[in-house]
Image (spheres, rainbow, N blue to C red):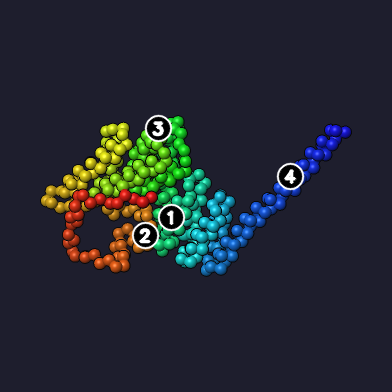
């Protein structure tokens, strides 16, 4: 009799749990359906064809199912419609975000770049190029992190660290230098904030090196020599600065007194930052309002800015 009562009680418990679970599941499904219906209504009211609308909606649904927030997905579609982006460009943006999400990479930096592009009225091709480059840098940063983890290092805030490293990669800091920073900083017990500050300093030095006319290979060699010269992080940054100052006072000058042009000029790469007046490679940048137009004589005078001038530290 006791066993029978226990069995009945167990059945009642299972039925009770099931009764509560079904409405909860239905509510979640309804919520997703409602979100899709909102997006569909927005797309249907646009000028996209039935095929294009279905293509956008299907990719948007993939984003939602992968875990991308509804508001982010909705905002991208709203802004795309407002800026008259073609359907295929929207899909490309969604594909970059979706691929990064599926690879376990942070997607917030990509979404932020897209929103920044919309805010600055940037051309769709530039937005796609910038977030594609950002996605590649996130992937490289994740590889640097995984190598450090495989070597037994314990790293807190892994996703945040990937974002920090990708920002420095965007500023052309050599991969090897960032790998060294992550391993050394972690082994010395430095916080994420401290590693971020050092990463920003390396970005500043890398940008200074680029402005001085050094190629990526020369920058990598300069950073590598500084790292091999000491184990003290502060001294390494100081050594890079000293070497750059020496380069800036001599490397720009070639026989005859002419200024050596930057070796990475017009390399064919698109910008990794979004600006409202971004010009395509090889085109003359659009002049900002209020600025005097640049002189366009047949033989422009070489820049003679002092060696002491250097770019401001990047804001990541």
Q: Earlier in the sequence, mark 2 or mark 4?
A: 4
Q: Residues within 10 Å of mark 1 (few under 14, many from 20)?
A: some
Instruction: Indicate which label's residue lies in the foreground, 1 or 3.
Output: 3
Q: Residues within 10 Å of mark 4 (few under 14, many from 20)?
A: few
Q: Position of residue 295 (x, y in %)?
A: 21, 65
Distance between the alpha carbons at the discs numbered 2 and 3: 38 Å
Quadrant occupied by the N terminus? top right
Instruction: Indicate which label's residue lies in the foreground, 1 or 4.
Output: 4
Distance between the alpha carbons at the discs numbered 1 and 2: 11 Å
Q: Is residue 175 visible?
A: no
Distance between the alpha carbons at the discs numbered 1 and 4: 44 Å
**Disc 4 target residue:** 17
**Disc 1 target residue:** 113
The image quarter containing residue 226 is top left
Contact check, label 1 and label 2, Cβ < 8 Å? no
**Disc 2 target residue:** 275
């Amino acid at each position: 009799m006791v066993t029978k009562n226990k069995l009945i009680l167990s059945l009642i418990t299972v039925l009770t749990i099931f009764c509560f679970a079904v409405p909860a599941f239905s509510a979640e499904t309804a919520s997703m359906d409602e979100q899709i219906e909102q997006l569909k209504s927005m797309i249907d009211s646009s000028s996209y064809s039935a095929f294009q609308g279905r293509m956008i909606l299907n990719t948007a649904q993939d984003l939602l199912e992968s875990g991308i927030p509804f508001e982010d997905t909705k905002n991208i579609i709203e802004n795309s419609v407002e800026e008259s982006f073609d359907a295929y460009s929207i899909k490309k943006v969604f594909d970059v975000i979706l691929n990064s999400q599926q690879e376990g990479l942070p997607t917030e930096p990509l979404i932020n770049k897209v929103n920044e592009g919309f805010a600055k009225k940037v051309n769709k091709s530039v937005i796609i190029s910038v977030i594609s480059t950002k996605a590649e840098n996130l992937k490289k940063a994740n590889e640097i992190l995984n190598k450090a983890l495989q070597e037994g290092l314990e790293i807190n805030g892994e996703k945040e660290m990937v974002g920090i490293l990708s920002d420095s990669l965007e500023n052309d800091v050599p991969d090897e230098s960032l790998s060294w920073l992550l391993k050394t900083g972690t082994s010395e017990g430095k916080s994420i904030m401290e590693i971020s500050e050092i990463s920003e300093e390396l970005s500043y030095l890398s940008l200074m090196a680029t402005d001085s006319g050094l190629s990526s290979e020369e920058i990598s060699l300069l950073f590598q020599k500084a790292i091999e010269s000491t184990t003290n992080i502060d001294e390494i940054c100081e050594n890079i600065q000293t070497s750059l100052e020496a380069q800036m006072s001599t490397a720009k000058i070639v026989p005859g007194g002419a200024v050596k042009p930057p070796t990475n000029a017009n390399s064919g790469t698109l910008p990794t930052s979004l600006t409202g007046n971004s010009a395509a490679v090889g085109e003359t940048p659009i002049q900002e309002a209020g600025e005097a137009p640049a002189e366009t004589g047949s033989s422009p005078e070489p820049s003679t800015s002092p060696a002491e001038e250097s770019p401001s530290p990047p804001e990541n």
